[in-house]
Image: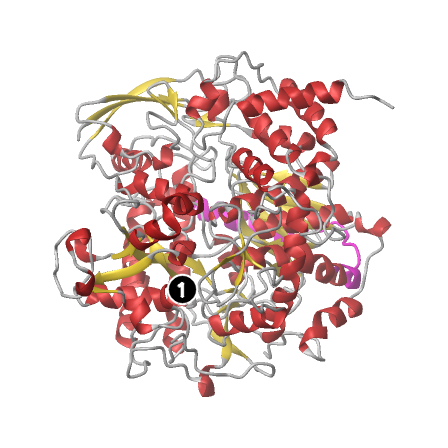
Amino acid sequence: MELTLYVWKQKGPQDKGGLQQYSANAVSRDMSFLEMLDQVNEELIKEGKDPIAFDHDCREGICGMCSQVINGVPHGPQERTTVCQLHMRNFKDGDIIYIEPWKARAFPVLRDLITDRSALDRIIQAGGYVSVHTGGVPEANAVLVPRQDAETAMDAAGCIGCGACVAACPNGSAMLFTAAKVSHLALLPQGRVEAGQRVCVMTDAMLKEGFGNCSNHYECQAVCPKGIKVRFIAKLNREYIRALSADPG
Amino acid sequence: MVLDAKCPVGPLAEKWDRRTEELELISPANRRKYRVLVVGAGLAGASAAATLGELGYQVETFCFQDSPRRGHSIAAQGGINAAKDYSGDGDSIFRLFRDTIKGGDFRAREANVFRLAMLSNNIIDQCVAQGVPFARDYAGYLDNRSFGGAQVSRTFYARAQTGQQLLLGAYGALSRQIRAGTVRMFPRTEMLDLVVVEGRARGITIRDLVTGEIRSHAGDAVCLCTGGYANVYYLSTNAMGSNVTAAWRAYKKGAFFANPCFTQIHPTCVPVAGDYQSKLTLMSESLRNDGRVWVPRTKGDMRQPCDIPEQERDYFLERKYPGFGNLAPRDISSRAAKEACDEGRGVGPGGRGVYLDFAEAMKHPGREKIKERYGNLFEMYAKITAENAYEQPMRIYPAPHYTMGGLWVDYNLQSTIAGLFVLGEANFSDHGANRLGASALMQGLADGYFIISHTIADYLAVHGPGKAVSEHGEFARAKEAAENLIKKLLSVNGRKTARDFHRELGRIMWEYAGMGRSKEGLNKALTRIPALREEFWENIKVPGSGAELNQELEKAGRVSDFLEFAELLVLDALHREESCGGHFRIEHQLPDGEAKRDDENFCHVAAWECRGTGISPVLHKEPLAFDNIELATRSYK
């Protein structure tokens, strides 16, 4: 296949950036999208040109590092698929493809398609964990967990923290990301103890980082490569209200 | 130099307790006087940093990814072993110990492995308390499944995302300490050198991957948790960024490198599709619980799998290893697959593949159950190959996956450099010549949560809190060396990219130091690797500058280290004139093609000491003794 690419190039956070045209030649249908970019980069380097910088690591859809908006859609056209697992058989000869970084106020561009997503880490640091020390914990089967709860917790815990939900949201909201973590822990007895405190501090941290609010567009769910459902946002809201209305004793 | 593993004396089951009682402690109020540098934030690094931070040490943690939640531990699918015996099928700590020693083909240290088996149970308790959503049965108890190389069900799992969930648990604990101010996190940084002052590891030199700044961090001890080196093969199941740089540069500063030839080729990976291939994807070994491995009986049978009748199929694992069948250990299964393909019976493009067939499992336990167990793996397979494994068999082929070798450490996880500790896959200690499934996560977390906090305290207590050393000349020298290396990489301005060289190196390694190794082939590699290295320094092209985010520069630095390290791997493979575990020397096999171990001459750890560039490394041997388990021929028949 022969393709025309328009790729976002930006030297650094201060640079204005813009789209640049490239051609991708002799692209195999069985290549992954990133392998197609590898090939373009190899040619650019040999021609003495600046290669396209992009984040990637595991290339099997689990590390959450890859992050590209392809033809306007975070992670591209295939549902429930990260960029690294998107294959070129989803495109056809002669296609024009636009490739851009995550665009959100809370994710400044570092270079080309690479953004700084450390704001997501700071939401977790605010309280996205169970406050347990190493050692001194009960035997693993001492606290039983209903199977359904464990399964639902796992549905939420599958979040890879890529930030596509933020990139897809018209408000640049990190609600789905935050909700996934809040729900995962709130559904388990081990995380229940701190659930009220957790939802409050994480929500505050999210707003402080410059993420917007949820106004029910559901774009996040549509692009989530792990299929995290917006019903967890409803759960976050319930947990939040429950925490605010708790009897202070 | 005599390598002293410093294993405690006394009965196996009491060794670790005895050691923890002997070790010096540091009182809570004094711990903040010590600074520990932790390099890497996968399972070993994140758990170590979190635990040391909780205890009150000042910790600085470094990772090359943009967040500590992305270390390659995250990609481990199948599960984590523990000797809980929840399944009631006769498991015990001793049995897990024995399986691991046997699985490692009697090339691991008994004391270390027993401690690992003991701590396995604490790990599960810890992870459950953190909120890791392990699979449960209908009564709410933890569920287990079986895994290769074991006849009991002792593997805990969270769908096929166990590594992800365990890492997120450790990342949560780490995040809590970052919040508390005990851990400072430096993502997007890469270690370029170890700073050794008066024989002790006192700091590291790093490059900030965003700004390009090179700077040093000083501390009282350094923990390397930087993973394995399977990317020396170019194509492997490792992440693109996984590298040997930190370990290799520590080796050059005096840390011995042990058993580099012990590499694991995993049997169940998606086969190579074309020259553009950048990595290989693992399909969890757990699939072999329900899938049956086969190839056509006759050479060159090009029919579709569904058109090949039952009697014309060869279920070669079941035939050769009836006791374990499709669950034979990884090294054995990989070799059997390679053999079938070498005989011309391989399937798929290029004939480098075997079938993993779920047709029977679709009848029993049924499609629903299979979907529940492996749904996301089938989905991943479909994305890569556009084939539906519910309808037709998967095609799989072995790929480099894990490296048992690593920096040599004693029982306290300390390397041959005082104050340099090595954890997780980066060390060599627990898996011998072959790692059993579901035990990498176990080792990373045992080292990080439960071992290092004891042993590092002893080291720190003995040496006392360090005075500022960052003005010492060694820091300036290490920084200058790192800067010079970068300048050199940028100045060649040749015609080939880092990836060209890496791919070429991978071809040499796969061909001559892969699943079957011979003296002749290894010697060929020993002439070709230095030639390639020479060409690298004449012809590498790295665009851009050092003072910016420059991914090609990162890549070139890592490839330059792989080009040096590869030679040591080959030397080690050449020295080990026996076959054991993942190391198969074709000159040393039994009449039936199984590995022929030589306990008389090779029952030792081979630890290599660097004597400088261009000078042959010196081999030191740590003899291995088996007092609690009979040194026997490994048989899975």
Image position of B283 with respect to A33: above or below: below
Q: Nearer the viewer, residue B47 or A53?
A: B47
Of all chains, the one bearing label 1 is: B
Dominant SS in magenta: helix
Q: Which residue is mark 1?
A: B327
Image position of B186 with respect to A103: above or below: below
The residue located at (45%, 27%) in the rendering is A224
Which three-letter amino acid code belongs to the residue tagged 1?
Answer: Leu
Q: Nearer the viewer, residue B195 or B349?
A: B349
Q: In the picture provided, is B91 more to the left or to the right than A31?
A: right
Q: In the picture provided, is B425 more to the left or to the right than A44?
A: right
Q: Please tell me in which quadrant of the rendered image residue B181 appears.
A: top right
Q: Please say whether residue A166 is one of the residues in the magenta stretch.
A: no
Q: In the picture provided, is B575 more to the left or to the right than A170?
A: left
Image position of B126 with respect to A76: above or below: below
Image position of B628 with respect to A209: above or below: below
Q: Quadrant of the C terminus of chain B?
A: bottom left
- The colour scheme is secondary structure
| Residue B235 in view (yes/no) | no
Q: Nearer the viewer, residue A246 or A14?
A: A246
Which portion, as a residue range, is magenta? B460-487
